[in-house]
Amino acid sequence: MITLRARGGLSLRLRPRAIAVGVTCVLLALALSVLAIGSGDYPMSSADVLRTLTGQGTPAEEFIVTELRLPRVVTALCVGAALALAGAVFQSLVRNPLGSPDMLGFTQGAATGALVVVVLGGSSLALASSAVVGGLVTGALVYGLSWRRGVHGYRLILVGIGTMAILTGVNGWLLTRAPLMDAARAVLWLTGSLDGRGWSNALPLLIALAVLVPLMLAGYGPAMRLVEMGDDTAAALGVRVERMRLVVLAAAVLLVSLAAAAAGPVNFVALTAPHLARRLTRAPGPNLLPSAAVGAVLLVGADQLALRAFPGHQLPVGVVTGVLGGAYLVWLLATERRAGRL
Amino acid sequence: MLLLAAVAVLSIAVGAKPLPLTDVWQGLLHHDAAEYAVVHRMRLPRTLLGLLAGAALGVAGAVMQALTRNPLADPGLLGINAGASAAVATGALLFGIGGVGGQVWFALLGAAAVTAAVYAVGGGRGATPARLALAGAALNATLYSYVSAVMLVDTASLERLRFWTVGSLASAEPSTVRTVAPFMAVGLLVALAVARPLNALALGDDAARALGARPALVRGAVIVAITLLCGAATAACGPIVFVGLLVPHLVRALTGPDLRWLLPYCAVLAPVLLLGADVLGRVLSRPGELQVGLVTAVAGGPLFLWLVLRGRVAHP
C-alpha cells in the first residue's frame, strides 16, 4: 500500500495491486469486446474492428460495427459493470457474501415491472421505465419494512428474501396471464438476454453509470469502508450511517433496475463479480471499481460463451451466468462453510 | 379435522365447471350419473393429492425447523423442492422421463442431495437464520436457473415441465396419487416416530443422549423423512413454497413446541391451507385457474414478512 501526501494535510492511499487488477480487467474487457465485435456472420479481424472504430472503415463495416454489434457489446459491458457495482455495495452493506440484489428481491422487482409491460404490451422505453419503477418501489418497500430505528443487515436480508419469494410468485402469475407469444418473449427476457440490443437499451444505463459511479466513489467510498467496521465505530468516526446507507442503496437499486431493464435480470453477476474482485485485489472494503471491471469482463465473456457454446443454437446469456454462477456458489458454500464464515 | 373435511368438500365441489352440491353428491356415489367422470377422474384425485402433499410439506417443514433449530427452515425456501425439480428436469432432458412414476425417483434423489447440503450448512454452530435463508435462496436461484436452462435448450422438456414447475395440483390423476402415496406415508410415519427423540434433541446433543436418544440416528431418520416427503410432494405437484414454513408456526401457537402434538396438527392443518389455496386459485380466475404454487407464494410471503417483523426470528 502506498500513501501519497500532499501539502495541506491531504493524503491518498493507493493499493498497487488493486490498481493493477482494475487496469488488467478493463484491458481484458476491451480486448474481449473487440473480439466480440469481430465475430459473427460477417467475421472481421481485430485490426479491421479497431480501424472501423476509429472511423476509417468501409461504410458496410461501419454499419455492422456501430449499428449492429457495438450496441450489444456496450450494453453487456454496462450491465456487467452496473450489476457488479450494485452487488459490491449490497454485500458490503448487509455484511454477507451472499447478500446480492438478486437474492434480496430487487432484481425480481424490476422484472415484475417489466413483465407488466410485456403482458399489457408496450414499447421498449415503457418496458425500461416500468422496470426502473418496479425496482425502486421494491427497494423502498424493503427498506421501509426493515426500518426499525435504523436498518440492520440481517433484517434487510430476511425482508428481502420474503419479498423475493412473493415477487417470484407474482412474476409466475403474470406469466400465466400473458398470451403464449408474449409469454415466450417474457421467459426469454426473465432469463436475461442481450439479443438485438440497440443504443436505446445501452444509453440510459451508460448515463446512470456516468452520474452514479463518481457520486458513490467520491461521496461515500471511504464511508462504506468505515461502516464495514460496524455502525457504532463508523458513527464515532464521523460517518452519518443511515443517510449514507439510504443514498448508496438507492443508487445501487437504480443501477440494478436499469441493468435489468436493458438486459433482463441476469443472474449471479452481482454475486460473483465482487467476490472475484476481492480475491484478485486482496484488498478489504467494498472494492467498487475493480468489481465493476470484473463484472464487465464476466458479462461480455459469458455472452460470447453463450453464442458459441452450441454452434447454431444461441443461448441467452442468463443461462450461462446462471449455471457458471451456480457452480461457483456451490464451491463457495463448501469453502466458506469449512472456514466457518457461513 | 372439521375444517379439513369442509375444505375437502369445497375442493371437490368447486371447479371450473360449476356444479350444484347435489349433483356432486350424485356423481360421487352413482356410477351412471353424468357428473361421475368429473368428480372421480378429476376432482377426487386432486383433492386427495392436495391432502397428501399438504400433509407432507407441513410435516417436513416442522421437522426441518426442529432439526436445524431454525425458525425459517422450509423445504421450498431452502431449495429442497428446487433440488427435486432440478433432478426431474435432468431426468426429462437425458432420459425423456415425464410420468410421475419415473419422476418420483429423480425427485427423491434431488431432494436427498439438497437436504444433505442444507443440513451441512444449517446444522452447524453459528448458522443464523439469516445466513441459512440466504444460502437457501442462493441455492434456489442456482437450481431454478439450471431448470430454465434445461427448458430453453430442449423444447420437449419445456413442454413436459412448463406447468409442473410453477407448482400445481391440476395434473392429478388416480395413478399419481397411487404412485406417491406410499412414499409420503412412510415419510410421515418416520417423522412421527422420531418426534419424541427429536424433542430431546432440542435440548442439545448431550442432554438428548442423557435422555436416551441417539442424535446421529435421529438426524439420519429425519433426513430420510424430509427427503421422502419433499421428494414425493414435488414429483407429484411441482415445487410449492411457504406451506412448510407457515403451518408449523401457526400450529405452534396452538400446541406449543412439543413435536408429538405439533406434527399431527401440522398434518391436518397444512392440507387445509394447501387445498384452501387451490380452491382460491380456481375461484379467483375462472374459467381458467391459478396454480396453487403461485397462490401460496403470494399469500404466504406477507405472512413470512410478518413473522420476521414481529421479531419471532432471533437476532443473531
Image (cartoon, rainbow, N blue to C red):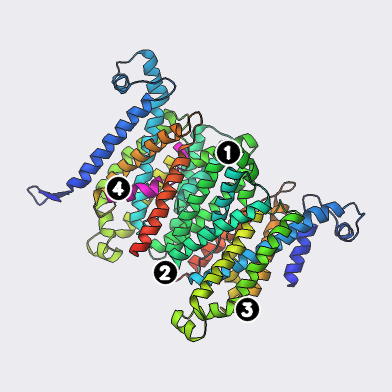
For residue B315: magenta? no
* Measured Cα–Cα span from mark 2 to mark 3: 27 Å
Separation of residues labelled 1 and 3 (CA atoms): 46 Å
Would residue A267 be visible to someone looking at this image?
Answer: yes
How far from the left and from the top, in percent, is residue B142? Answer: 48, 50
Q: Are marks 3 and 4 on the same chain?
A: no
User: x and y percent of residue B38 in the render?
Assistant: 82, 52
Secondary structure of the residue carrying tag 4 is helix
Which of the two discs, 2 and 3, labels the residue nearer the N terminus?
2
The residue beneath circle 1 is B154
Q: CA distance from mark 2 to mark 4?
A: 28 Å
Residue type, numbered disc 1? Asp
> Which residues make up the magenta segment?
A260-279
Mark nearer the N terminus (2 vs 1): 2
Q: Quadrant of residue A335?
A: bottom left
Residue highlighted by disc 2? B124
| Chain letter of disc 2 in the image | B
Question: Main structural element of the magenta stretch: helix, strand or loop?
Answer: helix
Q: Residue furthest right?
A: B32
Residue placed under numbered mark 4 in the picture: A277
Q: Quadrant of the C terminus of chain A?
A: bottom left
Q: Which chain does tag 3 point to?
A: B
| x, y percent for residue B70 | 48, 69
Amino acid type assigned to the residue bearing label 2 in the image:
Gly
Residue at label 3?
B261
